[in-house]
Structure formats: structure tokens, C-alpha cells
């Protein structure tokens, strides 16, 4: 065991070179019945402020009961491994572990360079348990072309090994099984101790994608590999932060004002909202540009250097400004989510 946590825990790490990386986290959460409580433990992880949610997106965002999180009611104390695949720029980064009622991190997070020529995961044996989440691969802001998965299942007299595969919420069906086994692509009663390789073709566009494996009893993942295809323009793979958000050379009349000091926060916030809206059933035609947000902050408060801008860089908390009142539904306003017009109401969570 690496660490038991009951409150937010931050794990800082440094990347030496821009590139694609795999961050692997193994943790477990207990159910309420084990703890003697109503409701069990839950855990989610943020990477540099990135908040992952359900895919496909629903009206109300979910952050805990999603594939790249840990749900004690489902896990019942068993371990689950989550591999995050994403671009990381050179520099310092933070994994933020956010538990509810507690969680156990089994090993120190592992950060490795993504190698498209090698399996993402290999040789992982499931703990003995009954039909629960086992492994999740979360691809962040990239396309998913193919997934190659090899699983070994044993046949047993009363309860054989089985494995279910879910890609972006869709269960891959076992067409050889009867109705009771169609949701379990690998079945010990069929494989009888052998390994079955299969390739899947989601051919999904750039975005957030989840590959889930659920385990029954003690199957073994021999290997899991993904093809991500072309992740886009050159700026997506080389000097991402430097290209995506423009640096301001001007330093004010005094020459001492740094107008680039919030670039990291701007990128994190814009990425979060782009993920939410671009995954909507009716997404906007183009994502929000972080340079537009940066320009707005400069105009409103000169990046916080103007009087009154120290704690409200976008000046939405000014007296007479209706921005916060609108977000809290104190002024009537609606917006579209998944094709439906719904009230705009952040239920008190929006603040300056």
C-alpha cells in the first residue's frame, strides 16, 4: 500500500520533455456495507485541474461515478487500475486525488512515455471478485482508432472467469454467447484457460474516450494496445502551451507586470469547458480559444494588476454586474444541453 487518504492529496511530478504520456494509478474504495456506513468510499483524480466526466455527456455532469474514477459500492474494496493517456508539456504537473469518505492508493503513480509500438498495459491479473470494474484507459483529447485486447479466462465448475469490454459507454457484445452471456466478450466457459485476442474499431474523433474492462473472478489481461491516429496539428505535439496561448511581451508602463502569469490557469479552465461543451449532443462549431479568454482578462483587470482586479481578474463580481446573479438563476436565463433548453443555474457553485 502506498497511501490511505481521507482528504485531498496532491502528487507533484516533473516532465522533462513535451510528449504523450501514460499515467497509471491503482487504488481501491470500500463499500458502505464494509464500512458500516450509508454510502461507500469514492475517489476521483484531476490532472493539472482537468475534471473528467461521463462519456457521452449527460445533462448533469458526473465526476465520481464514471469509468476513470473509483466507486466503493461497485468495487467492494477491490483494486482498480486507471491509465490516463494525454499530452504533457515539459515542466511541473500535479495529480490531485479527491476522495469521499476515504480511499487507498495501492502504489505510487507511474508516469511513462507513451509508445505506440508497445502495449499500453500487459500481464495484469484480477483479484478474485464478482462482476466489478477492473481496468480503465482514459484517452484525453485524442482520437481513438483501434483497441487491441488479449484476455485469458479459466473455466471453473461453478463460476468461470469472464471479462466485459465497454468503449465510450457501449458494451462490445459476445455474439457466440446466449442472452445471459452476451455482455461478456471473454468467457471462461468458452476459452477454457486459453487467450483470446480481438481488435475493435471505435474510430472515434479527437476527444475524451474511455476503454473499460470489468472482471468476474480472476481473469488475466495479457495485453491492451491502442492506436490513436493523428492527434492533429503540430502544436498538439510540440510546445503545446507555447503555441496554444500567445505570450504577451509587453510588461506595462512600469516594465514589471507579467501578463502571462495566468496562462496555465486559463488553459486548464478553457480545456475543462471545451471538454464539457464539445462532448455535448449538439456541440458548438468550434472550441473556445484560450487567447480570447486571456484578452478578456487583460481588458477587464490588466491581468489582475488594475485596482480591484487582485481577487476578481474578470471583474464579474463588480457591483451592478449581473454575471453571477445570472449563473445562479437569480435572473432568468436558459441554455441548451443535449438538445434541450434548460435553466442556467450553477446552484451557488459559480463565484468570482
Image: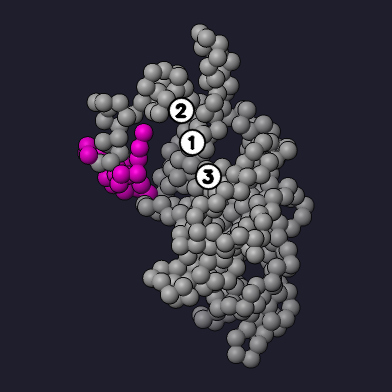
Position in image of residue 53 (x %, y %): 47, 52
- Closest to the camera, between mark 3 and mark 1, is 3
Position in image of residue 261 (x %, y %): 54, 26
Say which residue appears at 22% left-offset and 37% top-offset: 331
Q: Is residue 331 magenta?
A: yes
Q: Earlier in the sequence, mark 2 or mark 3?
A: 3
Q: Nearer the viewer, residue 97 or 50?
A: 97
Q: Nearer the viewer, residue 331 or 341?
A: 331
Say which residue appears at 32% left-offset and 29% top-offset: 317
Q: Is residue 258 magenta?
A: no
The answer to whether residue 200 is above or below residue 261 is below
Question: Callout 2: 10 Å neighbours few (<14), some, many (20+)?
Answer: some
> According to the image, what is the colour scheme of the structure?
one colour
* In contact (CB < 8 Å): disc 2 and disc 1: yes
Which residue is identified by label 3?
50
The answer to whether residue 35 is above or below residue 225 is below
The answer to whether residue 324 is above or below residue 341 is above
Gap in Å between the C-alphas at discs 3 and 1? 10 Å
Q: Earlier in the sequence, mark 3 or mark 1?
A: 3
* In contact (CB < 8 Å): disc 3 and disc 1: no
Q: Main secondary structure of the magenta part?
A: loop
Label ID, residue 270: 1
Q: Quadrant of residue 122?
A: bottom right
Q: Nearer the viewer, residue 59 or 144?
A: 59
Say which residue appears at 45% left-offset and 68% top-offset: 40
Which residue is identified by label 2?
293
Q: Is the N terminus in the top left, top right, bottom left or bottom right quadrant?
A: bottom right
Say which residue appears at 51% left-offset and 12% top-offset: 252
The stretch of residues the image draws in magenta is 330-352
Gap in Å between the C-alphas at discs 2 and 1? 8 Å
Position in image of residue 143 (x %, y %): 60, 47
Position in image of residue 92 (x %, y %): 64, 38
Amino acid at each position: 500500500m502506498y497511501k490511505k487518504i481521507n482528504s485531498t492529496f496532491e502528487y507533484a511530478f516533473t516532465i522533462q520533455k513535451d510528449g504523450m504520456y501514460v499515467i497509471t494509478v491503482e487504488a481501491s474504495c470500500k463499500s458502505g456495507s464494509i464500512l458500516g456506513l450509508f454510502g461507500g468510499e469514492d475517489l476521483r483524480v484531476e490532472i493539472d485541474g482537468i475534471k473528467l466526466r461521463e462519456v457521452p455527456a449527460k445533462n448533469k455532469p458526473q465526476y465520481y461515478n464514471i469509468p476513470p474514477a473509483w466507486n466503493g459500492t461497485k468495487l467492494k474494496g477491490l483494486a482498480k487500475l486507471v491509465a490516463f493517456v494525454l499530452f504533457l508539456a515539459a515542466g511541473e504537473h500535479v495529480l490531485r486525488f479527491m476522495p469521499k469518505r476515504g480511499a487507498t492508493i495501492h502504489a505510487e503513480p507511474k508516469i511513462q512515455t507513451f509508445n505506440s509500438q508497445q502495449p499500453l498495459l500487459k500481464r495484469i491479473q484480477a483479484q478474485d471478485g464478482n462482476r466489478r470494474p477492473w481496468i480503465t484507459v482514459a484517452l484525453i483529447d485524442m482520437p481513438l482508432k483501434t483497441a487491441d485486447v488479449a484476455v485469458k479466462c479459466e473455466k471453473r465448475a461453478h463460476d468461470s472467469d469472464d471479462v466485459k469490454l465497454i468503449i465510450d459507454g457501449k458494451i462490445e457484445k459476445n455474439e457466440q454467447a446466449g442472452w445471459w452471456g452476451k455482455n461478456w466478450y471473454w468467457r471462461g466457459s468458452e476459452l477454457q484457460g486459453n487467450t483470446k485476442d480481438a481488435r475493435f474499431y471505435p474510430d472515434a474523433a479527437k476527444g475524451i474516450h474511455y476503454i473499460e474492462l470489468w472482471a468476474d473472478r480472476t481473469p488475466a489481461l495479457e495485453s491492451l494496445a491502442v492506436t490513436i491516429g493523428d492527434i492533429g496539428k503540430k502544436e498538439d505535439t510540440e510546445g503545446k502551451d507555447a503555441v496554444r496561448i500567445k505570450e504577451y511581451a509587453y510588461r506595462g508602463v512600469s516594465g514589471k507586470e507579467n501578463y502571462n502569469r495566468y496562462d496555465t490557469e486559463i488553459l486548464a479552465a478553457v480545456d475543462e469547458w471545451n471538454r464539457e461543451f464539445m462532448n455535448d449532443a449538439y456541440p458548438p462549431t468550434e472550441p473556445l480559444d484560450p487567447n480570447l479568454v486571456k484578452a478578456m482578462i487583460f481588458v477587464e483587470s490588466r491581468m489582475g494588476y488594475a485596482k480591484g482586479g487582485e481577487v476578481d481578474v474578470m471583474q464579474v463580481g463588480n457591483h451592478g454586474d449581473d454575471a453571477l446573479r445570472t449563473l445562479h438563476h437569480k435572473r432568468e436565463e436558459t441554455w441548451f444541453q443535449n438538445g434541450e433548453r434548460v435553466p442556467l443555474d450553477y446552484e451557488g457553485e459559480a463565484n468570482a
